[in-house]
Image: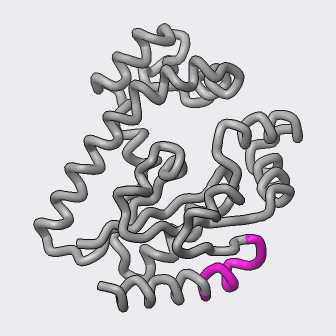
Amino acid sequence: MRLIGLTGGISSGKSTVSQIFTSLGAHVIDADVLAREVVAKGTPGLDQIVGTFGRAVLAPDGTLDRKKLGDIIYHDETKRKELEAITHPLIFQRFGELTQAAEARGEPVVIYDAPLLIERGLHRMMHTVIVVWVPRDIQIERLMARDGIDRKAAELRLASQMPLDDKRAVADFVIDNSKTREHAKAQVEYVWREILRGQ
């Protein structure tokens, strides 16, 4: 089985690219979905977060209030690292379980869709790395529009991730997502054909 890493950055359109891969028949494991699973209500992950950040990060129903937690970690590098120290090992463990299950089913290719793939060094485990790229100014504009935040707040969030130009430097394939969905789809179809050809 071949492991393909798919990454990008905030508002790069990685989720759109991931959806296109899925529509082509790819088996995609989404790190963001795993990140929500490992901190769901009643999990040890959520207990650890509450133990570190306090009950103020909980919603009234006892689930994690992601916005409250986000407001803390985006303004404090130390707090962000504390959160990552809790969640990343749990996410990686879950990824391993799902990958083993996919291999047991005979899946020829698994795509791991992870925003911090390169920052966490996980790209070294992958047979192929795909980076979804857009120019920084477009990334900022999309983030401002999506989250209703100002430029300063958008730049602060982007500063928590490796710049897309740096990620692009380690990619086997780059998807330019600065234009239309159709333009991105054509590139994804090409990359998927190349991946299947390389099995």
Which residue corresponds to the image point at 44% horizontal and 88% vertical from the top-left?
194
Q: Is residue 28 visible?
A: no
| Number of numbered labels in the structure image | 0
Which residue corresponds to the image point at 63% horizontal and 63% vertical from the top-left?
169
Please, what is the dominant secondary structure of the magenta stretch? helix
Q: Position of residue 66 (x, y in %)?
A: 55, 30
Q: Position of residue 16 (x, y in %)?
A: 58, 67
Q: Is residue 81 visible?
A: yes
Residue 49 is left or right of residue 140, and the answer is: left
Give the magenta part as a residue range. 178-186
Residue 79 is left or right of residue 25, and the answer is: right
> Is 5 situated above or below 197?
above
Q: How is the image coloured?
A: one colour
> Is 85 situated above or below 165?
above
The answer to if 185 sits in the magenta stretch is yes
The answer to if 129 sits in the magenta stretch is no
Q: Position of residue 79 (x, y in %)?
A: 57, 18
Residue 123 is left or right of residue 171, and the answer is: left
Which residue corresponds to the image point at 44% horizontal and 90% vertical from the top-left?
193
**Image quarter for residue 7?**
bottom right
Which residue corresponds to the image point at 55% horizontal and 81% vertical from the top-left?
188
**Image quarter for residue 159?**
top right
Q: Position of residue 69 (x, y in %)?
A: 58, 23
Q: Nearer the viewer, residue 16 or 189?
A: 189
